[in-house]
Image (cartoon, rainbow, N blue to C red):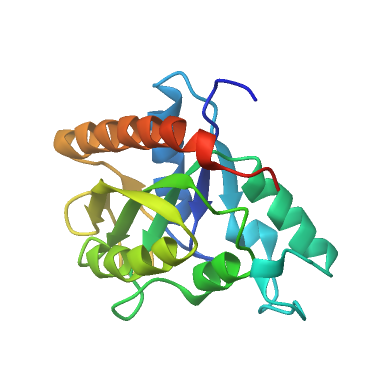
Amino acid sequence: MSSEIRIGIVVGSTRPNRRGGVVADWVRRGIESRGLVPELLDLAEWALPMLDEPDPAIHGAYANPHTRAWAAAVDRCDAFVFVVPEYNHSFPAALKNAIDYLFAEWNDKAAGLVGYGVQAGVRGIEALRPVLSEVKIAHVRTQVCLTLMTDFALSGPTDVGTLHPAPYQEETLGRMVDEVVAWAGALRGLRVPT
């Protein structure tokens, strides 16, 4: 096993004209500034159908090629940063669907959370935490919460805009990534190869 921690950036929104790509790019740069090479896991590109596996994920008997490909991508990662918009006081259904496809591939890995939205994505992040716990992902306490009102430059309500995070957001992202890396290293010994 390589000593380098591999972090997957999971973009949780599949909506056209979403801001998740802009946020994920910022997260990518933050991870790279720590000397790591992240892998982008953009759910819009994966285009997973609504869960269509005949057996529960806990058995790992994946029948569909798209599930096996998704499992391999998640399994390659030691940790994750979930980029999460807030939709109706929660996180997007596409993200829940992508998590539900798998089980063992998520186990004993670390995660950080980056939320965004009018309310800074806080409620989406908080709704996601128990789901991550259920699939045995250890999520760090430090989180980044980007508000559309101050961290983005927008020309209108549907504009993707540009991200201009405050300096404290940059610092928080760095702290969160450092925590994720530390936890991922500590959890490696617990993982059973899938």
**The one of 64 and 158 positioned closer to us in this rendering:** 64
**The one of 162 and 177 positioned closer to us in this rendering:** 177
In this view, 7 is above or below 51: above
Where is residue 31 shown, x and y percent of the image? Answer: 42, 30
Quadrant housing residue 20: bottom left
**The one of 154 and 148 positioned closer to us in this rendering:** 148
The tally of labels here is 0
Left or right of residue 58, residue 135 in this image: left
Q: Going 50% across and 55% down the picture, which residue do you hit?
A: 11
Residue 49 visible from this viewpoint:
yes
Where is residue 156 shown, x and y percent of the image? Answer: 30, 65
Left or right of residue 185, residue 67 in this image: right
Quadrant housing residue 59: bottom right
Q: Going 72% across and 49% down the picture, which residue do you hit?
A: 72
Q: Going 58% across and 71% down the picture, which residue do you hit?
A: 100
Image quadrant holding the N terminus, namely top right
Q: Going 62% across and 22% down the picture, which residue do you hit?
A: 2
Quadrant housing residue 19: bottom left
Where is residue 108 shown, x and y percent of the image? Answer: 49, 48
Residue 7 visible from this viewpoint:
no
Where is residue 154 shown, x and y percent of the image? Answer: 29, 56
In this view, 8 is above or below 120: above
